[in-house]
Amino acid sequence: MKRWQFWVGVAISAVLLYFALRGLRLAEVWDVVKEANLIWLIPGVAIYFVGVWARSWRWHYLLRPIKKISTASMFPIVTIGYMGNNIYPARAGEVLRAVVLKRHEGVPVSASLATIIVERIFDGVVMLAFVFLNLPELARLTQDSGFLGNIQQLALWGSALFFGALLIFLAAAMFPLVTERIANKLIDKVIPAKWRDALKGFTNRFLSGLIALRSPWNILMIFATSVVIWLLETGKYWFIMHAFPFKVSFFALMLMNGIVNLATTIPSAPGYIGTFDLPGIALLTAYGVPKEIATGYTLLLHAALWLPITLLGAYYFTREGLKWTQKIQVDDEETFAKTEENT
């Protein structure tokens, strides 16, 4: 909490929440939530954890060229990472799960971080695919929504970003020696001498984490798995929708999933407060859902996405014997510290 980035994220979340809830009577929103048929949370949470298992399989698949680790071993580590993303700023859970994997399996943090970044790139590509698949519908919805009117432009910029990153990573995977030479030259030119050897070692281990991208079959498998993961998560949106008195198509929920997850790349308070809620409410309202119902649904969905994985991740975290204020020493060249919990 002493870092300025944390407070910038809190400020952004506060502003977005203000716009999300502006003009609403919160008592009416609460009435909507109280009247929701919460039994639909059970299949919603269940299908979400099937998606988490699929994420664990995808990470296992990415790491296979480095070390074969079972999906069952990866699942607790993935939940710890998502717990970290939910309670720490700046997606610190991604580093946390790389550190826990190092403790368990000896995989260098830099190599596992490379696979995690690859995951995020493919996730971004799939989210953009969800948006582009529904662009004609989105164009119709933007007439009455200034917020959604910016999504098409965001999708274009996001496409350039994610596809550009994907091309760079594919090139680095296909031509590792060339990439290593270029990286070493840049390090020699701009990095002080005392840090050069350590950074070169980190770069080499990072490149080893991209081995899976050298095979077109692996790329296809990772992409297909990413599509399945996000369709399963959209399934959670669909199940929880049945707890409320409105109906939209599965494609509309795919669009919502794509938009809110693209929006969560914006800096915010931990748990994606505001960045998830404002676009979700705006999209459903544009579909004609009354704002009180759209808000109640989005807030309950957000809680259902946040709470179960956070609780399970916290359980696995404590089972690891880790402490919330502990600094984790990886090795002499790679040291990562968990954010101290001073809140």
Image (cartoon, rainbow, N blue to C red):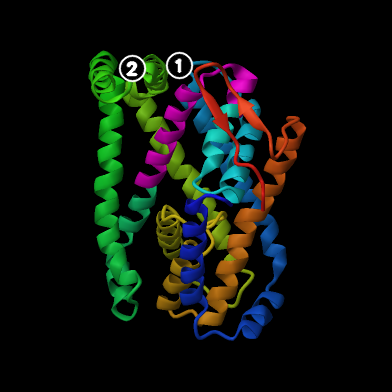
Secondary structure beneath label 1? loop
Residue at point 56%, 40% (across, down): 93
Would residue 106 be counted in the magenta stretch?
A: yes
One can see residue 186 in this view: yes
Question: For the residues carrying marks 2 and 1, which lies nearer the camera in this image?
Answer: 2
Name the image quarter holding residue 105. Answer: top right
One can see residue 56 in this view: no
Residue at point 55%, 60% (across, down): 237
**148 left or right of 279 in image:** left
Q: Main secondary structure of the magenta part?
A: helix
Task: Name the residue nearer the viewer: 329 or 115.
Answer: 329
What residue type is disc 1 on? Pro
What residue type is disc 2 on? Ala
Secondary structure beneath label 2? helix
Q: How far apart are marks 2 and 1 (CA)?
A: 32 Å
Decide: is 230 above or below 179. below
Residue at point 29%, 71% (across, down): 149
Q: Within 10 angstroms of label 1, few (less than 14), some, or many (20 or more) residues?
A: few
Q: Which residues are the magenta region? A: 100-125
Q: Within 10 angstroms of label 2, few (less than 14), some, or many (20 or more) residues?
A: few
Name the image quarter holding residue 191. Answer: top left
Please name the residue that numbered disc 2 is placed on: 193
Q: Where is residue 178 in the image (x, y as percent from the top left)?
A: 23, 16
Mark 2 and 1 residues: CB-CB less than 8 Å, in contact?
no
Q: Specify which label sits upstream in the sequence, 2 or 1.
A: 1
Q: Where is residue 106 in the image (x, y as percent from the top left)?
A: 58, 16
Please name the residue that numbered disc 1 is placed on: 65
**305 left or right of 287 in image:** right
